[in-house]
Image (tube, helix red, strand yellow):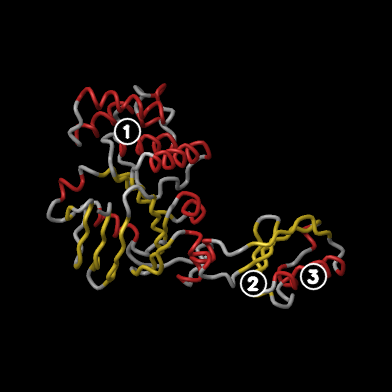
Amino acid sequence: MYAIEALSLSKRFGNIQALSQVDFTVNEGETFGFLGPNGAGKTTTIRILTGISAPTQGSARIFGRDIVRDTIAARRQMGIVHETSNIYTDLSAWQNLMFTAELYNVGKKEREKRGAELLELFGLTERRDDKTNGFSKGMKRRLTLAMGLINHPRLLFLDEPTSGLDVQSNLIIRDVISELNKTGVTVFLTTHNIEEANLACDRVAIINRGHIAAIDSPERLKNTIQSVQSIEVAFDPVSLVRVEDLEQIPSVSEVRKQGDKFRLITEDPPGVLEEIMEYSRNHNVRVISVTTLGPSLEDVFIRLTGLDIRTKGVKAID
């Protein structure tokens, strides 16, 4: 039995087709990434899978239970952590946890034991009785995740869990996702962060304009575009190096400046390496580091969606 089955899901909002014949399955115990640009259909999909919105066509099952016909039974098996906070800021961290547990019909003894464990896990024990209106964004996000775990869910939906967080909160949440995976909890992770999906997910689905563009493990997706190889090089002084000059090197199809380094996309890394050394001699700059790279998950994303997420966007309903 699958944790999630999405069967020909479609959703219309007036004249806008937000989802079109979306099919995928999520295995029990895996961390499944749902990756796409703004407006791709990520939020629409998660709203359907969690019973908030009904599909225009198609169906979805959570551990074999139809999310529309058997909503309550399906939702009892899941925890939901939305991108926007659902914390009541006039309540304390402890009160928020206990209130959420009561909504899931968790018994008093169990919810108090579980609540104490989660506050400790997320580093919030010392603030358990403080009203949450004084919490930082990272603390609120950690509390939201604790609330999503209060009922020991078999399936956890995480919508952009680390968006805009401080480093400490980001690391805590990533560690928790890893530990949940080890204990057999299925995690459905929607994210704009390609590196997060690459590190955390067993499989990734890339959605664009309401269609599934690809589903596979990050490494297998990378292997589908082996022609996208690159060289990352750093020069000293970097101020003397121009992207326009590097673009003139034969066999270089694109140059990206990334911090103090340049990434040269090419199908001929050995030939370009020779040209880089020649360039450094001719322009009186020193090569201080050089690395050859295979395709990244970001390259796969750009190839499949035709969208460079660093500079472009899509106007649609997500």
Provide the secondary structure element on which disc 2 rests: strand
Coordinates of residue 184 in the picture (x, y in percent): 35, 42
Mark 1 → mark 3, Cα distance in angstroms: 60 Å
Tell me the kind of residue under disc 1: Thr
* Mark carried by residue 124: none
Crowd rating for badge 1 (residues with CA inside 10 Å; few <14, some 14–19, many 20+): some
Residue under label 2, please give it: 254
Q: Is residue 243 above or below residue 135?
A: below
Q: Residue at x 73, y 60 (%)?
A: 233
Mark 3 → mark 2, Cα distance in angstroms: 17 Å
Residue under label 1, please give it: 89
Answer whether labels 3 and 2 touch (C-beta < 8 Å): no
| First along the sequence among labels 2 and 1 | 1
Q: Is residue 170 above or below residue 119?
A: below
Coordinates of residue 273 in the picture (x, y in percent): 76, 68
Tell me the kind of residue under disc 2: Glu
- Closer to us: mark 2 or mark 1? 2
Residue under label 3, please give it: 274
Along the line of sight, the residue nearer the viewer: 272 or 249: 272
Q: Quadrant of residue 16?
A: bottom left
| First along the sequence among labels 1 and 3 | 1
| First along the sequence among labels 3 and 2 | 2
Q: Residue furthest front?
A: 1
Coordinates of residue 104 in the picture (x, y in percent): 20, 36
Q: Quadrant of residue 113?
A: top left
Mark 2 → mark 1, Cα distance in angstroms: 48 Å
In the image, taking residue 109 as reference, residue 180 lies left or right, namely: right
Along the line of sight, the residue nearer the viewer: 261 or 316: 261
